[in-house]
Image (cartoon, grey):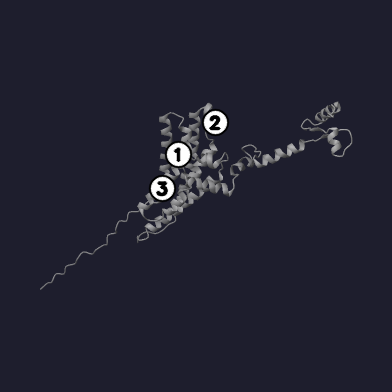
Amino acid sequence: MEPKWRPQEFEEAAELLSADPGASTLSMSASDTTSTAAGGGGGGEDVKLDLSEDEEGQEESSELLGGQKPTGGFWTFEYYQSFFNVDTVQVLDRVKGSVMPLPGRNFIKHYLRSNPDLYGPFWICVTLVFSVAISGNLSTFLSEMGNPVYHYRPQFHRVTIAAVVIFMYAWLVPIGLWGFLTWRQGAERQIGGYSFLETVCVYGYSLFIYIPTSVLWIIPFEWLRWTLILVAMVISGSVLVLTFWPVVRDDTKVMAVATVATIVVLHTLLAVGCKMYFFQTAAHIPTPVPTTPPTYTALVT
């Protein structure tokens, strides 16, 4: 027997929707044959389910799984808290990616995954400041150890100089690069570019390789220091080139090459400048030993 059409079902559904517009209703009509087989009576049964609460719960759970958090204005603490929303595993994975660049692997696309942070770049810069300053002091002490006229004095001003140079590079260069790329790309191609936070993030992580390099610069061998700085520049510069080349290659050939060359030159100046200032080798000039002029004694006879 075919189920009968019941107008009251639509009336009840309309009343439910008018009472709660966000609710979803599901109406199931069981036939007489199915009801009889299930042990019911002769008439069909109407079942209505309100799924509004379940849908809200699913939206809340998906919001939590997706990591979407409401942020306030730039003057609130919650706004800046989202920039440090990373765990140790993510930071270590990004550090590993900054010291092992591979062709065809974009650091931003592969490691950041639309979740850039400032936690890693900030602590990398702070650690690099102290490693360069302390290692530079130790290097000077070891190189002057055999000089009898040398008296060791802690050079705390090197910490200030290292902090100014490194933080200015890690912030001003990304600001200039991001502004230049935004201007060159224009509004119609800005979708394929990088955000300011992503640019700062990749520059910060690219400096990690200089932390162990600056510690090894304590070894007083110039050929070893220049070898280490060359390896560090190749690794760190490769991260930047492999990241920003896909963005600038759509520009004119001259402008693309000039942009990449500027990135490499500025990165080289930072490394060479730190080595020349903090790890300069003093030239030992032998101190002449004063000699007394020979005296002649005249014998008077």
Name the spot of residue 159 as percent of width and height, x first. 47, 50
N-term mark: 1 or 3: 3
Mark 1–mark 2 distance (CA, rounded to whole Å)? 20 Å
- Badge number at residue 191: 2
| Image disc number at residue 241 | 1
Which residue is rendered at x = 44% and y = 51% of the image?
A: 214
Q: CA distance from mark 1 to mark 3?
A: 15 Å
Q: Is residue 60 visible?
A: yes
Q: Which residue is mark 3?
A: 231
Q: Is residue 157 visible?
A: no
Looking at the image, residue 15 lies above or below residue 146: above
- Callout 2, which amino acid? Ile
Check if mark 2's residue and mark 3's residue have beta carbons within 8 Å. Answer: no
Q: Do tag 1 and tag 2 residues touch (Cβ < 8 Å)?
A: no
Q: Is residue 20 above or below residue 87?
A: above
Q: Earlier in the sequence, mark 1 or mark 2?
A: 2
Residue type beneath disc 3: Val
In the displayed structure, 185 sits above or below 66; it is above
Q: Secondary structure at mark 1?
A: helix
Q: If the image is split into quadrants, where does the N terminus sit?
A: top right
Q: Quadrant of the C terminus?
A: bottom left
Residue 264 screen position, x and y as percent:
42, 39
Secondary structure of residue under mark 2: helix
Quick one: 26 or 297, which is closer to the camera? 26
